[in-house]
């Protein structure tokens, strides 16, 4: 099935109160795990490449792997740039065939975030590519992006309204208490803030840093208007745990295919679990 955009999958999610999983991908095994999970669950899915993925695999390998997977998959797939850093990087992704991009201007003051986001929207929309932005600052670490607790900042609902009016983005990542990476304690989501944001804007909202958030909280956030949920850390953890276990149990094995197969299966299982949690099974 040809790639689709965020708008095409998030509209239905928003209308029917479920979320589409956005899963980070870095190599062939991860792409296969995500796509097989989505196909078996009959779920629309978002594959996304982070800064680390682009650095590790390179954009051509990522795009080549995803195109190969898309050829045989009969579910809607969005190819999305995660936490895009600047205009030039977005342009590169447009040229390579991404159907969606995130421009993360959250480290900038509001006016600058609006300016860079608007510039990206003006370039992407005429090419039929959707845009996600971030407002407020999500804490934690993902690849090279480190946001300390003191730098993290919740999304201000009134600013979200201004931001949407001035940028016309297709999806907005909100900072409501989640963080990238592994949580030290249990994350506490600010539902009042989420509610206020949804009272002021209709734009589909995105939950980053969703690995490790209790299932109840994820469900509640989706029920309140989150339409896209990002998962990276849980996939990495599933991969590494299965790989360690296999190598520990089979120290004599040196065939990478044997070592990586259980890791790929473990990632597929976690992606399926998330898809069911997000309510996107049988929505393709
Ligand atoms: O952009 C990617 C996600 O926000 C990753 O979040 O570290 O909780 O999996 P995670
Ligand atoms: Zn993120």
Image: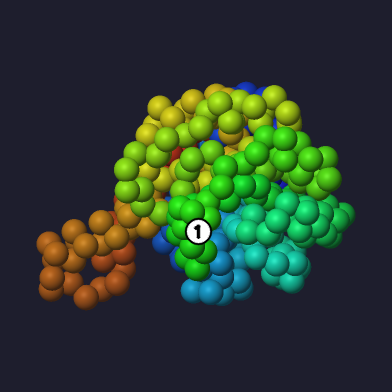
* One can see residue 224 in this view: yes
* Residue 176 placement (x, y as % from top left): 54, 38
Residue shown at 59% from the left, 31% from the top:
194
Is 250 on the left or on the right of 76, as rendered?
left
* Residue 6 placement (x, y as % from top left): 68, 45
* One can see residue 7 in this view: no
Q: Nearer the viewer, residue 14 or 271?
A: 14
Quadrant housing residue 92: bottom right
Quarter of the figure with the C terminus: top right
Q: Is residue 105 above or below residue 11?
A: below
Q: Is residue 65 above or below residue 231?
A: below
Q: How many marks?
A: 1
Residue shown at 69% from the left, 49% from the top:
132
* Residue 277 placement (x, y as % from top left): 44, 32
Is 9 on the left or on the right of 262, as rendered?
right
Q: Is residue 88 above or below residue 21?
A: below
Residue shown at 46% from the left, 53% from the top:
149
* Residue 166 placement (x, y as % from top left): 83, 45
Q: Is residue 274 above or below residue 100?
A: above
Quadrant housing residue 91: bottom right
In the structure shown, which secondary structural element does the residue marked by tag 1 occupy?
Answer: strand
Q: Nearer the viewer, residue 233 or 199?
A: 199
Quadrant housing residue 101: bottom right
Q: Name the residue that disc number 1 marks.
A: 147
Q: Nearer the viewer, residue 157 or 119?
A: 157
Q: Nearer the viewer, residue 36 or 157?
A: 157
Residue shown at 73% from the left, 52% from the top:
110
């Amino acid at each position: 099935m040809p790639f689709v955009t965020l708008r095409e999958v998030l509209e239905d999610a928003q209308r029917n109160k479920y979320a589409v999983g956005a899963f980070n991908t870095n190599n062939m095994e991860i792409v296969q795990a995500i796509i097989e999970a989505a196909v078996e669950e009959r779920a629309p899915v978002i594959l996304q490449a982070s800064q680390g993925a682009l650095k590790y695999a390179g954009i051509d390998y990522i795009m080549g792997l995803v195109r190969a997977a898309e050829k045989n998959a009969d579910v809607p797939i969005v190819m999305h740039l995660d936490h895009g850093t600047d205009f030039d990087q977005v342009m590169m992704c447009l040229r390579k065939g991404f159907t969606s991009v995130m421009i993360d201007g959250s480290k900038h003051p509001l006016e600058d975030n609006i300016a860079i986001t608007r510039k990206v929207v003006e370039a992407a929309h005429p090419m039929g590519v959707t845009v996600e932005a971030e407002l407020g600052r999500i804490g934690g670490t993902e690849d090279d992006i480190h946001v300390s607790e003191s730098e993290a900042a919740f999304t201000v609902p009134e600013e979200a309204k201004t931001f949407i009016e001035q940028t016309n983005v297709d999806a907005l990542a909100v900072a409501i208490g989640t963080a990238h990476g592994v949580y030290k304690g249990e994350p506490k989501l600010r539902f009042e803030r989420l509610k206020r944001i949804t009272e002021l804007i209709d734009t589909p909202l995105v939950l980053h840093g969703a690995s490790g958030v209790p299932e109840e909280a994820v469900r509640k956030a989706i029920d309140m208007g989150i339409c896209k949920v990002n998962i990276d850390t849980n996939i990495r953890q599933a991969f590494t745990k299965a790989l360690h276990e296999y190598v520990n149990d089979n120290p004599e094995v040196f065939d990478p295919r044997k070592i990586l197969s259980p890791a790929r299966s473990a990632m597929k299982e976690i992606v399926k679990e998330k898809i069911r949690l997000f309510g996107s099974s049988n929505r393709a």
